[in-house]
Amino acid sequence: MTVSVLLFHGGCALMWLLSPKLEAHSRPHVVHWWSAVWTAVAAALWRLALAAFSRCLRSSSKRMIVSGLKPTGARHVFPCMDDPAMKATFDVIIEHPSDQIALTSSPSESTTTLSNGWIKETFYRTSKLSTHLLGFALFEGLTELERYSSRGQVVRVWSPFDPTSSPAAEVALNTTLDAISNIKDLLGLDYLLQKTDVLPVPGQIVPYDVYSGLLMVRDTLLFCDVDDSSIRDQLQCAMALNHAVAHYWFGISVTAAWWSDLWVTEALSTELAYESLACHFPELSMEPIQLVESVLPAFLYDGHSETRSLSSEAWTETMDGSQKIVMSGKGLTILKMVRSIVYDSSYMRAKKTILASYGTINTSQLWDTLSQATDSFVNVSLVMNNWVTNAGYPYVTLRQTVEDNGARRIYIIQEPFSYFLSSRSSLHWNIPVAYKTKDQSDARVLWLNDSVKNISDDSPQGEWVLGKVDSNGFYRVNYGPGNWKLLSDQLLTNHTVFDVSTRASLIDDAFNLARASRLLIPTAMDLTRYLDKEDDYVPWKAALRALHYLLTVMSKSRSYNSLKAYISNKVVVAMRRYKIQEDVIRRRLLHSELFEAACRYGDTNATKIATELFKKWRSRRQRYLGWTKDGFNIRREDVPLVFRSMADTLAGRELAWKFVFGNWRELQQRFADTPSIQEEILRAVSSGMTSGYELKQLRQLKELIDIPRLRRILERAEAQTDLHIKWLTENEKYVTDWLNESDV
C-alpha cells in the first residue's frame, strides 16, 4: 500500500493520496485522492493538534500532530477493515513545510525541495504491519538526541529543550537503549527495527502509545533525572519506556489476532517490561512492585459494575487508561497463575515458540502453546479460560468451623466480587487457593472450581490461616472475624512473618471488602495499627491508597479531622526513621511516599521542608531558561493536572467541582477539539462526592452532555456517589467509634 500525506500549513486541512486498488505483492500507483477537513478526522486520526510546549526554545507555541489509529482509527485514514491480523507493508511520502519535522514508522529515504519551498519526504517501505501500528508525527521545535547501535540501528529521543542543558533527554535515551538490550538478552531474539523515535506527547491520556518505530510517551513522564526527579518518577519513567520497547516483541512482531485477544500481547509485554526493569533496578524486587503498581489498581477498576471480560470485543469502543490498567494488571496475574502451573522452563519455552512461530496470536493459541510446552500434561485452557471470559473477579472466604463431632474444618467459598450489590452474578472461576497456617513453612494449593469446598483444619487451635500467598491469584480473600483478629495481632507482634506482598494484599483486600460492604470497616482499620513499624514501600503504598479513599469518603464527617490525624501520626512516626536523601532505592521509594503523605495531611515539619526544597529547585532551574520562557501560562494539556491537584484536598475538591459545574459550557467550547482534556477534567472533579446535593448536580451536568464517553464518566461518578452515601449511612458510626477507642 502506498500512502502520501499532505499537511496544509497551519494544520487546517489534511490530504491523503492512496492507491485505488490494494493487491498483494504489488506496488500500485498513487492516483486516488481523498481529502478531509481537520475537524472531521480529529477524533479518529489525530490525537493532538497545535500543542503548545511551555518547555521550548522560543517563546512562541510549538505545533505537533501525531496519529492515533488504535484501535479502529485506520479505517478513517485509508481503506481497511481495522483487522489486526491483516498486515501490509506501507510506502509513505509526506509533504510538509521546511521548518517542520516528519516521522513515520520507517526511516527517511530521501527529501526533495518543492517549488513552493515545502519538503517532499519519502520514507523506506515499512515491514509488514497491522494497520493500527502505522504511525505518523509532524512537529516543530523539538531537538533530537541520538545514538547508533553496533548493528547501525538508530534510537532518537526528541525533547522540547536543548538536550545539552539537562541530563533528562540523555536519561531517556539511555533507558530506551538499556531496555532494548535487556529484552534482547532475556529472549535471545534481536530487535530488528532500523530506527526508533521516542517522542514526548503533551496531554496524552495513557502513559505511552506504541507504533512501529514510534514510541509516543506522555511528556511529563518521559523526562526525569537523578538530581531533580523523585525515585518514584524515575521508576515510572523507566517503566513506561521499558513497556513501550517490550511492545516490539509482543504487540508489533506478534500482534493480537483480534481485539478480544489484545490482553494477550498487553500482558506478555507488561511481564517482559518488569523483567527488563529488574535489570535496570537490580536492587529492587520487582514482584512486589508490580503488585502495587499494576495489579492492585487493576483490582480496583475491575470491581466496578461496568467491568468487562478480557475477551470482550467492547475493547474496540475505547482505549483509555483504566482499560489498559485492567488488561496489564489482570493479564499479568493470569500469566503468573499459568506460570505456577506449567513451571518456569515450560513457560519460557512457550514464549519463545510464540515469538518464533506466530505473527498474530489469539487466546486459544496461547493456551495451546503453553499446554504443548508441558507435552500436553496440563490442559491450560480448561484450567484458565474462565479468567479471560468472565467479567470481573472472585473473592474467596475462608471460614474455620467446628463440626458436631468435634472435627475442625475450613470451608472455602467463592463469590463474584463487586462494589455494587446489584451487579453481583453467579459466575465461577477455577481458583488456585494457596493457603497456609501459622505453623506451616510452605503453602498448600487447593483448586477451587465449585462454589464451596471444605478441608480438614489440622492447625493448632487459635492460630491464623492465610488464604493467598505470594499474591498468586487475581482474587480477594475474606475471613471470619476471629481470623482477621489473629492476622492483625500478628502484624502488631511481628509483621515480617508475612512477606511485603502479603502485607499489602491483606490491607488492600480488607479495605476493599469493607468498601463493598463485605467486611466491617473497624476490622480493616485494625490492620493499620502496625503501620508505624512498617519499613517497606509496597505495604505503605497500598495502605495510603486505601486510607486516602476512606478519608475522601469521610470528608464531610465529624470524624474527618480525627481520621486525618490518625493517618498523619502513623506516617510521621515511620518517616522519622529515614533521611530525605537515602542511599538505598527501597528506602528512597518509601521516604518519597511517606513525605508526600505527610505534606498532604498537614504535617508542619514536612510542609516546611517541602517549601524549602521547592525554593531551591526553582533557583536551580533558572539556568534552564528555555523551559520557563512561557511565563505564567498554563498549557492546555496541563489543565487536567490543575483540576486534579485542586481536587486532592477537601476544600479544593469542592471549589473545583463548583467551577466546572458553573462553567461547563465555556470549558466544553474551549476544549471542543480535545475530548481527552474534557474527560480528564470530569474524572478529576467528579470523584469523592458524598452528598445528595452533589448527586443531584452530577445528574444535572450529565443532561448537558451528549458525548457518550463523557456521559459514562458522570454515570460512573453518579453510581459511586450513591454508593458513598449508602456506605456512610451504614459505616460512619463504626469509624467514629474505632477512632474514639484508639484515643485519636
Image: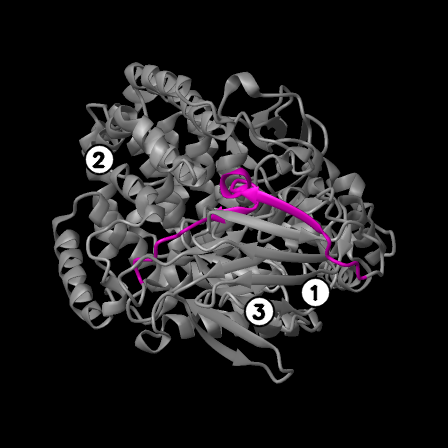
Mark in the foreground, 1 or 2: 1
- The percent position of residue 493, horizontal first and vertical second, equals 36, 47
Crowd tier of the residue under label 1, counting other residues whose Cα lies within 10 Å: few below 14, some 14–19, many 20 or above: some
Q: Is residue 268 visible?
A: no
Image: 392 above or below 533: above
Let me know if residue 191 is in the magenta part: no
Instruction: Point out the image quarter for the N terminus.
Output: bottom right
Q: Magenta span covers which residues?
A: 27-55
Alpha-carbon span between mark 1 and mark 3 = 13 Å
Image: 346 above or below 430: below
- The percent position of residue 2, horizontal first and vertical second, equals 72, 58
Q: Who comes first in sequence, dot 1 or dot 2?
A: 1
- The percent position of residue 211, horizontal first and vertical second, equals 60, 57
Q: As rendered, which of 715 and 705 lies closer to the eye?
A: 705
1 and 2 marks in contact (CB < 8 Å): no
Kind of element beneath mark 1: loop
Residue at figure coordinates x 17%, y 62% from the top left: 613
Kind of element beneath mark 3: strand
Q: Is residue 563 visible?
A: yes
Q: As rendered, which of 361 and 578 lies closer to the eye?
A: 361
Image: 293 above or below 226: above
Alpha-carbon span between mark 1 and mark 2 = 50 Å
Residue on which the image places disc 3: 196
Q: Who comes first in sequence, dot 1 or dot 3?
A: 1
Q: Which disc is residue 126 wearing?
A: 1
Alpha-carbon span between mark 3 and mark 2 = 42 Å
Q: Who comes first in sequence, dot 3 or dot 2?
A: 3
Residue on which the image places disc 2: 652
Q: As rendered, which of 348 and 259 lies closer to the eye?
A: 259
Mark in the foreground, 3 or 2: 3
